[in-house]
Image: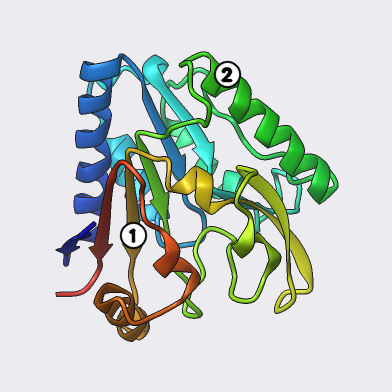
Amino acid sequence: MTPEVLHTTSFPVDGARLILDSARQAIAEREVFRIALSGGHTPAAVYREWAATAGDLPWDRVQITFGDERCVPPDDEQSNYLMARKAFLDAIPIPPGNVFRIRGELPPDEAAAEYEARLAYLGSRFQEERYRHDLLLLGMGPDGHTASLFPGTGALTERTRNVVDNFVPKFDTYRVTFTYPLINAARHVCFMVEGAEKKPIVDQILSGQADYPAARVAPTDGRLTWLLGWP
């Protein structure tokens, strides 16, 4: 599978356009748009632009999940859910029942098991063995991690479960994260990456010469896009 590589100097605009195009296509074809959000700082401006330019997007047909979460309450400044809420969820008329957050305030194993069960239930409504996102957004850290799949951590070898708690030694804490089986089941996976310091890692991944966690993302029956915030 050859990924699509898009370079942009207008990251929020092009990122929001990609999301909106995916949403309209999914709703036209399947009557619902299922998107997984990435956390961190990079996508916040994209989410704000998405909310500002969505126009008549039928938000009642949009379902939002989260690719990973810190083990903190939803009002903690480290929470991916809080970032998304501040960036755009509070600004759009999406039904609260269409936003499925990971409950990071629970013990990590309980939070992961609960989210796995939630996705299994939602997937069963579509007669799916594994929940299938229409668009799954990912970022990438300077160590090549994506979601909360960090180098050298146990979640990298998970082949059965969709959501796991993953201990990250560099932060001496747990995260809750999607696994490769769930990520690679998506119809479309899009990395959104900014920061010139990440360019060498992205170049290695795209050349097929790297084994960073991000390099292991390969949709089994879908598309892979890299949206890169440099010319």
The amino acid type, in three-letter code, at marker 2 is Gly
Point out residue 223 in the picture as x, y percentages from the top left corner.
Answer: 26, 47
Q: Is residue 96 visible?
A: no
Residue at the image position 61 percent from the left and 26 percent from the top: 120
Foreground residue, 37 or 82? 37
Point out residue 89 in the picture as x, y percentages from the top left corner.
Answer: 48, 34
CA distance for labels 1 and 2? 27 Å
Q: Earlier in the sequence, mark 1 or mark 2?
A: 2
Check the image and name the residue furthest to the right: 107
- Rendered-image quadrant of the C terminus: bottom left
- Rendered-image quadrant of the N terminus: bottom left
Q: Is residue 74 visible?
A: yes
Foreground residue, 184 or 50? 184
* Pointer 2 residue: 97
* Pointer 1 residue: 192
Note whether 6 is above or below 89 in the view shown.
below
Foreground residue, 219 or 46? 219
Residue at the image position 59 percent from the left and 70 percent from the top: 150
Circle 2 SS class: helix
Which quarter of the picture shows residue 148?
Answer: bottom right
Residue at the image position 47 percent from the left and 47 percent from the top: 183
Point out residue 99 in the picture as x, y percentages from the top left corner.
Answer: 54, 28
